[in-house]
Every structure is written in C-alpha cells, then in structure tokens.
Amino acid sequence: MHPITYFQSSMLGLLQGVSELFPVSSLGHTVILPKLVGWNIHQNASYFLSFLVALHLATALVLLAFFWKDWVRIIKGLGRSLRDREIGADPDAKLGWLLIVGTIPAGILGLTLQDYLRKLFASPEYASIFLALNGLVLFGAEMLRRRAPQTEGDDDTRIARTVGWWQTFTVGAAQAIALIPGFSRSGASIGGGLLVGLSHKDAARFAFLLATPIILAAAVLKLPQLAGSQGNGVRGPALVGALCAAVSAYLAVRFLMRYFETRTLTPFAVYCLCAGTAAAIYFAV
Amino acid sequence: MPYRKQLVALAVVLGIALVAIAVVYWVEPARSLPSFFPGHEAGSSHHHVKHGIAAVLVGLACFAFAWFNTGPKKRSA
C-alpha cells in the first residue's frame, strides 16, 4: 500500500500548485490540511519530502514555460552584458542581473536553513499561527506600499528601471521567510516589490520570475531523493500529484497575472488571517 | 592602487577562496572539515553538498563583480 493514496496526492497537488503562487504559503497549507482532514501523513518522513519534490518541480516547470519568452530575452540580455562587460541601459540584462542578485541570498539561506527550520516548525499548530502572521505581513505591505509611478514601456523594462541592486537583494532575502511553514514566498516578494515602488502587476511578475530558479533548483537538487530508495512507494502518487500541481499552477499564474492588473493583496491577507486564526483555535481546543 | 582596483582584487581573491572552500565541502566528509568551517562534526561521514553550492554561488558572484568592474571604460560625451 502507498503511504500517500492517489486521492490524497491529487488533492495535495492541486493545493500545492495554487498555494505556491498565491501569496498564502504552500508549505503552510501542506502541513495544515492533512491534520485538518485527519490524514495520517508524517510531515518530516522522507517519503513525504520526496513527494513534495515532485510537486515543486512541476510548479517550477509551469512557471518556466509561462514566462518562457521573458526568460529567453533575459538570458540573451545576460549574454550581451557579459560580452560587453557592462549592463548599461539594456533592460533585459538589468532584469537578469536583478534576478541573480535576488536569488543569491534566497538560495544561500534556503540551502543552509531549510532542513533546520522545517524540522523546527513543521507542526500544524505553528503553521496556522504563522499563516495568520503572513496575513499581517500582507496587510503591512499594502499599507506601506509606495505609489507606483505611471510609466510607459513594457513590463520588464519598468521593473528593471524601478528596482535597484540593494532592493532586489532585500526582496530576494525576504523570500527565505517562506522556509517557515505558514509564511508565503510569493507574499514576501510581491510585498517587497510593492515597498520598492512596483505596481501590483509588476511586483507579481517580478516575484514569479524570482521564484522560478529557486523552486526549480530546490526541486532538482532533491530529485535524487525521489529517484532513490526514499521515493519507494510514492513515485506513482508523486507523478499524479505533479500533474495536478502543474494544472493548478498554470491556472493560478494565469489568474494572478490578470488579477493583479487591478486588484491588491488585501483579500489574501484577510484569508490568511482568518484561516490561520481559525486553524490555530481548532488545533488548540 | 586605486580603491576600485583594490575592490576588484579582493573580489577575485575571495572568489577563488570560495570556490576552493566549495571543493573542500564536496570532497571532504564533515569529520574532516577544518574545525572553523560551518558543518564540521566529529565522527560524521556526511558530505555538506549544500554548503558547497552556497560557497560556489557567492564565489561566482564575486567573479561577476570583478568582470564588470574591469571592462572597457565608456567615454563620457
């Protein structure tokens, strides 16, 4: 018998695809949901971590495919800047280096702290409290955000002009808060983007571009777990979960890119605050 | 030596050191790491692959900094 059933893997896949991109903490939901519905899944068991690798890989590949044309432009820009040994006024090169500078702190913090923080806080009780706090973070970002200047030009050019080196480093480092179940990576980076003066749409775009290499690298790095003995018994459910995660991630990113053209983080903040508080009370009584 | 050149030299030295540290992390088990390295653990045969990746990432960033700061200077109009 599989330690995770196909039904459970489908549900967790659908949830992961949506919650990884919505600013509501995928890790927090993956920790809280099984406990809420009474599934006997051990969050720190090696089979569950291997299962999560497949879901993350699927989400990252969907993000990569969705922004494929942007990535091609960015990589060409990076190549031009390396050849000319200057970034200059090339927006694609600037955006590429902004993403690299933002990825370095997130990558280093993730590599060094991930296992420690996950073991420390991977309980539904902690996750629900942190989910409520994530709501407050999103509220805070909305309250403190700078008004984005109305400028012409395409999305990537606007982002490259608005975001500075130190700002991208800070926004990248802020993503590391998502190592704590309940806090959202996209919430931290969209909130950070708003604080540095990006519009909601540009902040979401920047957050998704920034998230892609991190999620992809984390998944690829742990892929041997899934292929090795730790993946025994979960490869089938992991494949089904990954397919579900891919479908829901595609729908989520499409929805969010349209949603943030006109709307704000406030509904997600309300959801996190209410759901986190309700779950914390439920687990406490 | 001008301040900018000093920074570039420092970045190159730091980059080489970090790549070397990454290799040490990949090759040596935790018990054989120098005691001042994060991750040193007496008796452990675990290889700190992730620490090595982190070191190499920062090393590459140092090289990139040096690369851009040693490029041909633009003439001002």
Image (cartoon, rainbow, N blue to C red):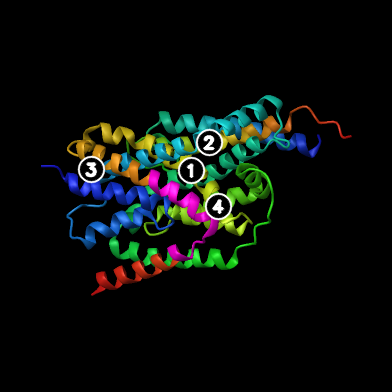
Residue ID for mark 2:
B57
Q: Which amino acid does label 2 sit on?
A: Leu
Q: What residue type is labelled 3?
A: Tyr
Can marks 3 and 2 be said to lie on one chain?
A: no
Q: Which amino acid does label 4 sit on?
A: Lys
Residue ID for mark 3:
A47
Quadrant location, the N terminus of chain A: top left
Q: In which quarter of the image is residue B65?
A: top right
* Dominant secondary-structure state across the stretch colored magenta: helix
The reply to whether dot 1 and dot 2 touch (C-beta < 8 Å) is yes
Going by the picture, which residue comes out furthest to the right? B77
C-alpha span from label 4 to label 1:
24 Å
Residue ID for mark 1:
A107
Which chain hosts label 1? A
Q: What residue type is labelled 1?
A: Gly
Residue ID for mark 4:
A201
The residue depicted at 54 percent of the width and 54 percent of the height is A261
C-alpha span from label 1 to label 3:
24 Å
Give the foreground label among 2 and 4: 4
Can marks 1 and 3 be said to lie on one chain?
A: yes
The reply to whether dot 3 and dot 2 touch (C-beta < 8 Å) is no
